[in-house]
Image (cartoon, grey):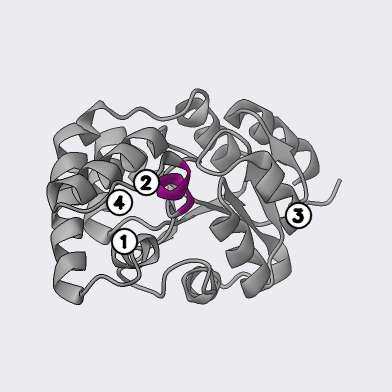
Amino acid sequence: MSRQFDLLVFDWDGTLMDSTGMIARSIQRAFADVGLPEPSDTAARFVIGYGLNEAMQYLAPDLSAEHIRQVVDAYRGHFLAKDHELQLYAGVEECLPRLRNAGFRLAVATGKSRAGLDRVLAATGLAALFEVTRTADEAFSKPHPAMLEYILESADVSQSRAVMIGDTTHDLQLAINAGTPSLAMSYGAHPLKDLLPLNPLAHFDDFTELTEWVLVHG
């Protein structure tokens, strides 16, 4: 059976790593630290996938640039104090090599910073599996297509031969804006009911389920 995709592009937080709860709590505590009302859990989870500046600006659009900087710095302090406790989702460590060994090429498109992504790639030992990665401080924030367009160009893969895999509406809208199909993960930052209107090819409740689908249908 001929293969549908050559390149699998993964989001990181909420797709490969179980980090959305900690990110949301760190956002809330950062706002409290600088004397601002804490965003709701729903609001804090919604901005996961944006670059940090864009996320904080979305949550408090009237804040000055200096206040945004203060919130971002406070967020980094809270997140970095705990990020060593984060774990990959069940199945990720075992399944990514299976996908590579089956001939799929792998990439990452993430709202993390370059320093943050490099840190977790080293900590998890997954760096060698990904051919190309792109972060929020190297491109416009999701869902602008630039991040994914860079990956496609770097990998020399056409839009139709790549698929974006993520847990947020930002990931799926990124795919739409870049002209690629998408696959949705239901266990991350955004509820499945918000993902389905963006027409992913399929959706999955765990990473092993995704992997088995890709090995058969991808």
Q: Name the residue under label 1.
A: 56
* Residue closer to the observer: 171 or 118: 171
Residue at (44% x, 45% y) in the render: 45
Tell me how far mark 3 sits from mark 2, CA to CA.
34 Å
Question: Pointer 3 and pointer 2: residues touching (CB < 8 Å)?
Answer: no
Report the amino acid beneath label 2.
Ala
Tell me how far mark 3 sits from mark 4, CA to CA.
29 Å
The image shows residue 112 at horizontal and vertical percentages of 33, 55
Q: What element carries label 2?
A: helix
Question: Pointer 2 and pointer 4: residues touching (CB < 8 Å)?
Answer: no
The image shows residue 121 at horizontal and vertical percentages of 31, 44
Query: Height in image: 127 above or below 83?
Result: below
> Of the residues tagged 1 and 4, which is closer to the observer?
1
Report the amino acid beneath label 4.
Leu
Q: Which of marks 1 and 3 is nearer the N terminus?
A: 1
Residue at (28% x, 43% y) in the render: 28
Could you say which disc has been placed on residue 128 in the image?
Answer: 2
Residue at (22% x, 46% y) in the render: 119
Spot the residue most to the top.
90
Q: Which of marks 3 and 4 is nearer the N terminus?
A: 4
Q: Is mark 1 on a helix, strand or loop?
A: helix
* Residue closer to the observer: 99 or 199: 199
Q: Name the residue under label 3.
A: 197
Report the amino acid beneath label 3.
Pro
> Of the residues tagged 1 and 3, which is closer to the observer?
1
Q: Name the residue under label 4.
A: 117
Question: The magenta stretch spans which residues?
Answer: 42-46
